[in-house]
Image: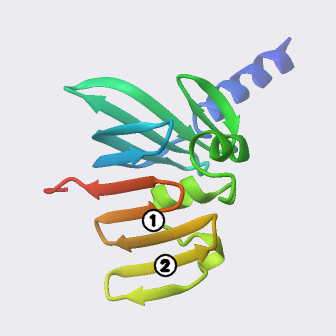
Amino acid sequence: MLKTFLFIMILFFTGCTVKKVVVSEPYIITIKSKKFRFSDYAILEKYSNKEVKIKVFNTGVLVKEIIIDDKICSDEGCLSKKEFNNLYLSKFYPPGLLKNVVLGKPIFNSENLIKKNSGFIQKIYRKNSLDIIYKVYKDSVYFKDRINKILIKIKKMKGN
């Protein structure tokens, strides 16, 4: 009985400490693709377990929540990163692309990466499948794929 009680207490206390918000910052996020479209105020939360959560608000009301971890989850359900790319973005994207863009990290194994004073630029082209311009600066991210008609813009709110 004592062992069961101790086990439950350990599980309770460690379960509450596994996932903590490390960063929570306000942004204006725009995502446009053939099946996914919004441009609103959002809170970007980064967790200690590497999970990323995007909470999208419209007139102060939470309208969409996207969780990026091993899978990508939203109010429509969870999909593998590959399935999400195939359905909402492009089948030519690597599984970690959305998370890397949201976090402002290099994509496609840093292919064609040009470092700038406050960030970097990547241009990635594959005939008939990709035509990407990706710019990351201190307070903004810009991703555009002209062939797949995808735009992702993330701009940190002023005053933060």
Q: Nearer the viewer, residue 118 or 30?
A: 30
Q: In which quarter of the image is residue 117?
A: bottom left
Type of residue at label 2? Answer: Gln
Q: Quadrant of residue 154?
A: bottom left
Q: How crowded is the residue under tag 1: few (<14 C-alpha within 10 Å), some, or many (20+)?
A: many
Q: Nearer the viewer, residue 110 or 9?
A: 110
Residue located beneath label 2 in the image = 122
Q: How many labels, in total?
A: 2
| Colour scheme shown | rainbow
Q: In which quarter of the image is residue 94?
A: bottom right
- Residue 15: percent from the left, percent from the top? 65, 31
**Residue 128 appears in view:** yes
Q: Which of 42 and 82 is in front in this view?
A: 82
Q: In this view, does 55 lie to the left or right of 9?
A: left
Residue found at the far left of this picture: 159
Secondary structure under the numbered disc 2 in the rendered image: strand
Q: How crowded is the residue under tag 2: few (<14 C-alpha within 10 Å), some, or many (20+)?
A: many
Residue located beneath label 1 in the image = 104
Q: In which quarter of the image is the C terminus?
A: bottom left
Q: Residue at x 47, y 37 (%)?
A: 36
Q: Residue at x 61, y 48 (%)?
A: 49
- Residue 16: percent from the left, percent from the top? 58, 31
Q: Residue at x 41, y 54 (%)?
A: 151
Q: Quadrant of the N terminus?
A: top right
Type of residue at label 1? Answer: Gly
**From mark 1 to mark 2, how far is it between C-alphas?**
12 Å
- Residue 42: percent from the left, percent from the top? 32, 40
Residue found at the far front of this picture: 128
Q: Residue at x 45, y 72 (%)?
A: 133
